[in-house]
Image (spheres, rainbow, N blue to C red):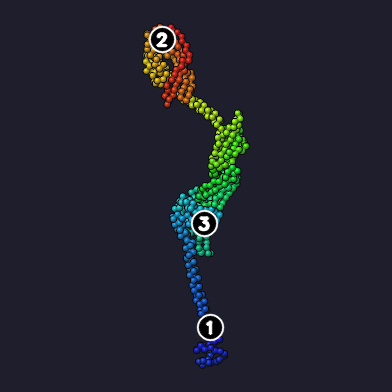
Amino acid sequence: MKNCINCGSTIKGEERFCLNCGVKLGAETIQPLKKELTPKQRNRRRLSYASVLVIAAALIGGHYFLQWKYDASRHLAEMNKAFLKGEGEEFLSYFTFSDDTVSDPESFYSYVETEGWEGLRERLLEEVTILENDELSNIIDDSMGNKFLSVTNDSILFGMYDRISFNLKPIEVHIELPLDKTTLAVKDLDVSGKQGEVKSLGKFLPGIYAWKATVPSEYAVIEDSGDMAVIGEGDNTYRFIPPLEAGMVSLTSDVEEAVLSINNITTEKLIKDTNTIGPFPFDGTIQLSAEIKGADGNVLKGKPVKVTSDNTHIEFAHVQEKLQIDRATQLATEEKQRLVDTFAEQAAEYINSFRNEFEYALNYADYSYISSFFPAGSEAQTIYMKEIENHGKIDGYYKYQFQSNTATGVEAVDAQTLYVKTAEVFYFYSDKDNYIYKKTKGYTVKVINGEMYILNIEQLTTDKESID
């Protein structure tokens, strides 16, 4: 269909003139008939224009959003903000680590706090700068020498953007099993095996993790729990031995032939045949005892003992009494020997000093020379005061001349008393007779706080000869 260019009327056939206005028709006076658009078509056209504008705006906005999203400085700033606010879970969310790594946000936060966040933050900034300058970044170690984290960048949308990632290096945790059939569980992970086996539990971020251990036993339920502080040992590994309050027990007794009972139930086994038994919990819920028939047929029972450690000893009263006597005897012997070793030489010198002063006391009939050698009020004091007094009553001339005094032996009476044997030679002159005396004596010497006193002087032998 065509229409007249002059009046717009429709030209239906091959007319040479417009039937409406009479204008001569030709190539320059006719044009194709314009099709009228419906309202629906006009709406679609407007929506198309709007879509183009929206897409263009989205592309521009997306560009700026992606620039913002992958901006490392903003990432670090938000990480720093979360740390300063003490928000462990949010803080950890800014790091990446493998899906099979166990983590605890709060304890990881505490670990970073201990390591020193300010210094770590500066290291992260340095590594980001290195990457932005297209240089090779470094792995950051923790204070123990473990590889702690690395900073990497990944190209996004054909290299238009760089995404910076802060990658945590996990710690491989190994468990050394303390008992046979021990099962240790941490969160959703667990291991089990024989005593002494070392098994890998899994990968962990540094931090504190609760553990629980169970051990099957025919004697009692064994369960224990605690906290495991995962800190690498310099090679990104950590070995943990659960400190179970349970274990095998080394059993001994005063009477090895006694029959063992566990919680008052006999095992019909001799102590000597059950040197190691268990496993037992060390919480006192297990009580061990034993009994044996004596020579008179009476049953001798050991003292029951609750298991609280890996060494248990069952005592029998009659054996303990003998041991106590033997220990007391041994202790007394040791104390006596110690007294001899310490004071034997001093005691011999002390007796020599006494003899020197005793010579003056006799010759001058003056007890004061020897008064300090005897305890006040002692029997020895009374005896020697009387002897000196009697010498003062002698009529005529007399004189003692001591020649020698030799200690021939020192032994301990008890922990504070020494017995000193001596050989003495002295002359006695008077206006009537002259004699030489050879005597052996025994001095009982008390040692009190390092001071010595003579308790008794025993005359052992006496040899008296007259001289001209």
Report the amino acid beneath label 3.
Answer: Thr
Rate crowding at label 2 as few (under 14), some (14 to 19) or many (20 or more) other CA atoms within 10 Å. Answer: some
Q: Is residue 11 above or below residue 291?
A: below
Question: Which of label 2 and label 3 is nearer to you?
Answer: 2
> Sequence order check: which comes first, mark 2 or mark 3?
3
Secondary element at image label 2:
strand
- Image quarter of residue 378: top left
Q: Point out the tag, 1 or 2, that comes first from the N-terminus.
A: 1
**Residue plotted at (40% across, 20% down):** 377
Mark number displayed over residue 35: 1
Which residue is at the front of the view, 386 or 448?
A: 386
The quadrant where residue 254 appears: top right
Q: What is the x, y in percent for residue 345?
A: 46, 22
Please say whether residue 65 is visible from this viewpoint. yes
From the image, tell me which residue sits under label 3: 96
Specify the amino acid type for callout 2.
Answer: Tyr
- The residue wearing badge 2 is 429
Height in image: 450 above or below 126? Answer: above
